Amino acid sequence: MKVILLKDVPGQGRRGDVVNVAEGYARNYLLPRGLAGEASPGKLKEMAHRRQATMLKEEKIEQAARKLATSLDGLTVTVKTKTGEAGRLFGSVNNKDVAEALAEQHKIMLDKKKLVVREPIKQLGTYPVTAKLHPAVQAKIILEVVEE
C-alpha cells in the first residue's frame, strides 16, 4: 500500500516521502497514529504543490542571504575594549560583541549565532569573522579590536 508520511518514521522515511508498506502496517500502525496518510492522486498533487512552494520560499531566503552577503563582504567592524599590559584584553571579544558592534556601527541586525569567531580574541589587532547567513552563503567581515 502506498502512503505519504506525515511525520518522520524510523526505518521508513522522512516527512513527505511516498513509501510502499504492508497494508496491515499502514492500517494498524501508521494511519491510526497520524504518521501517514493514503497516497491518493489528489494528495500526491497537493504534496507536489507544497514541495514546489517550499522550494520557492527557500530560494527567496537564499537570494536575500546573498544580497546581505554582498553588503557584508569586506565590511570592517571596530570593537573598543579595555586593555592591560602588552595589549592583552580584560576578558575577550566574542561573537556577541561583534553582533552588537555591527548593529551599532552599520545598522545591520544579525543574530550572534550566525557569526563565527574561530577562537576567543584576547589581543588587539585585526581578525577575520565569518557570517554564515545560509547553508550555501557566507560572508567575511573584518574585525578590528582597538584600545578604548
Image (spheres, helix red, strand yellow):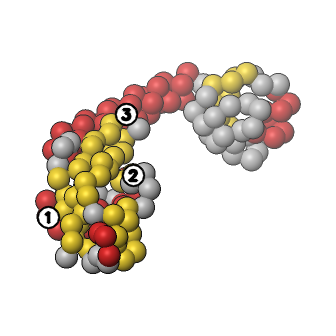
The quarter in which the C terminus is drawn is bottom left
Residue 105 got which mark? 1
The image shows residue 29 at horizontal and vertical percentages of 81, 40
Name above or below for residue 43 compared with residue 104: above
Judging by the rendered image, the residue that carries numbered circle 2 is: 116
Q: Earlier in the sequence, mark 3 or mark 2?
A: 2
Q: Earlier in the sequence, mark 3 or mark 1?
A: 1
Crowd tier of the residue under label 2, counting other residues whose Cα lies within 10 Å: few below 14, some 14–19, many 20 or above: some
Q: Quadrant of residue 134?
A: top left
**Residue at (33%, 46%) from the top-left corner?**
130
The image shows residue 54 at horizontal and vertical percentages of 40, 35
The image shows residue 79 at horizontal and vertical percentages of 23, 66
Q: Earlier in the sequence, mark 2 or mark 1?
A: 1
Crowd tier of the residue under label 1, counting other residues whose Cα lies within 10 Å: few below 14, some 14–19, many 20 or above: few
Residue sitting nearer the eye, 90 or 75: 90
Judging by the rendered image, the residue that carries numbered circle 3 is: 136
| Amino acid on which disc 2 is placed | Val
The quarter in which the N terminus is drawn is top right
| Amino acid on which disc 3 is placed | Ala
Q: Quadrant of residue 57?
A: top left
Q: Are the two marked residues, 2 and 1, in contact with CB atoms closer than 8 angstroms?
A: no
Question: How much space separates mark 3 and mark 1, taking CA atoms?
Answer: 26 Å
